[in-house]
Image (tube, rainbow, N blue to C red):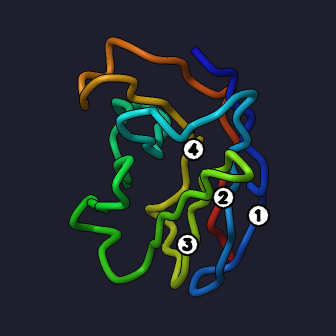
Amino acid sequence: QVQLVESGGGLVQPGGSLRLSCAASGSIFSIYAMGWYRQAPGKQRELVAGITRGGITSYKDSVKGRFIISRDNVKNTVDLQMNSLKPEDTAVYYCKEHPRNWDPSFGSWGQGTQVTVSS
């Protein structure tokens, strides 16, 4: 397992943008997929965006067209570009590795980074 460290969270006004970055302690080249999750107060943690080893991306419906996930297998980073942010995007965002498949029971998590969308 790799260790994951997120950065880039903060406070932003509605309609603004943020870029989250997840740095891995080792190579992510062979990892099946990487995902960005979020958890809002009182809600379950949910998958927001994912990217496979082959570069195939998937998104939660509510963020399609606004969020873009990318991975750099040389720098061992996974980024989440978030545009047109809404108050309902407010949550703690977590990076996660999926070593074999999309089952969240396996693989490490980052410590999370807070994103707050508010005027």
User: In the image, 97: left or right of 59?
Assistant: right
Q: Is the N terminus in the top left, top right, bottom left or bottom right quadrant?
A: top right
Marks 3 and 2 close (CB-CB < 8 Å): no
Marks 3 and 4, Cα distance to the nearest angstrom?
11 Å
**Residue 14 spot, x, y in % from top left:** 59, 81
Dot placed on the residue nearer the N-terminal end, 3 or 4: 3
Local secondary structure at mark 3: strand
Residue appearing at x 46%, y 72% in the figure: 68
Dot placed on the residue nearer the N-terminal end, 3 or 1: 1
Residue type marked 1: Leu
Dot placed on the residue nearer the N-terminal end, 2 or 4: 4
Say the numbered circle drawn on residue 111: none
Residue type marked 3: Met
Marks 3 and 4 close (CB-CB < 8 Å): no
Say the numbered circle drawn on residue 93: 4
Give the answer, above or below, for where 1 lies relative to 111.
above
Closest to the camera, between mark 1 and mark 4, is 4
Mark 3 surroundings: few (<14), some (14-19) or many (≥20) residues within 10 A: many
Residue type marked 4: Tyr
Say the numbered circle drawn on residue 82: 3
User: In the image, 75: left or right of 98?
Assistant: right
Dot placed on the residue nearer the N-terminal end, 1 or 4: 1
Dot placed on the residue nearer the N-terminal end, 3 or 2: 3
**Quadrant of the rendered structure where residue 80 is?**
bottom right
Residue type marked 2: Thr
Local secondary structure at mark 4: strand
